Amino acid sequence: MAGFGGGIGGLGESYRVHEAASWVDQSKPPGHTSTGPRTAQPGWWYSWPKAGLLGLGLPFVYSPNLVWFGISLAVYAAEPYPGLDGGGGAGVDWRAECLKRLAINAAVGLGYIGYWHCSLYRWSFSGRKFHPANDGPPAARMLHNVWYTLLGIAQWTAWEMGFVYCFASGRVAFTTDAQLLAGGWPLAWTVIWTLALPVFRDFHFVRC
């Protein structure tokens, strides 16, 4: 749950990745601390939106959403989308661009997931495993997970590059970087939607 017992970017209270939240009773075995004191109040799950625009930003800032946003921004800055310079996408090898974007997305996605897999199961960064004897999923399950993750990344890339093609060819209107950085409503709506999406995702996850 976004904002559920963590610091900035989903880090612990002392801004470390691999530490238990302060409300966890570490004298008990993993998984035995009651969440009742944190969830007993009526409406706790929708308390973020009730705080207004300031509250709307909290699930974004105090959760991994901030980390994912940073990764996305870094990828966009390092490898901008092709054909959005006003030339209608002329001269763009779209097949090559799609394959390049697929490789980028696969590297980022598998790299992120791989970090957590290695930190938990290979480097033993977590000292409070729910099943201490669990050394991680067997090879067959890992291959299964990687395969379906790659299928998901392929679909993600298809939608992503499909929209880029529509933007570049003029089939769908879009806001350019220059228009966005000039401020005004384009920037305001971008910020609002960026902050609102984690709230929508939490509501959908908890209530639907």
Image: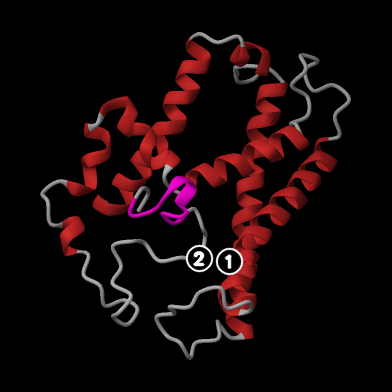
At x 63% / y 44%, what residue is drawn? 71
Q: Looking at the image, which residue sits at the far right? A: 91
Closer to the camera in the image, 124 or 99: 124
* Disc 2: CA contacts within 10 A as few (<14), some (14-19) or many (>=20): some
At x 43% / y 78%, what residue is drawn? 128
Closer to the camera in the image, 106 or 131: 131
Residue 9 falls inside the magenta stretch:
yes
Q: Is residue 159 visible?
A: no
Q: Is residue 199 above or below residue 16?
A: above
**Marker disc for residue 15:** none
Write down the quadrant of residue 86 in the picture.
top right
CB under 8 Å between discs 1 and 2: no
Residue 155: horizontal and vertical position, in percent?
61, 50
Residue 156: horizontal and vertical position, in percent?
61, 47
Magenta residues (range):
4-14
> Circle 1 — which element?
helix
Q: Is residue 117 above or below residue 7?
A: below
At x 16% / y 60%, what residue is drawn? 37
Say which residue label 2 marks.
Answer: 18
Say which residue label 1 marks.
Answer: 116
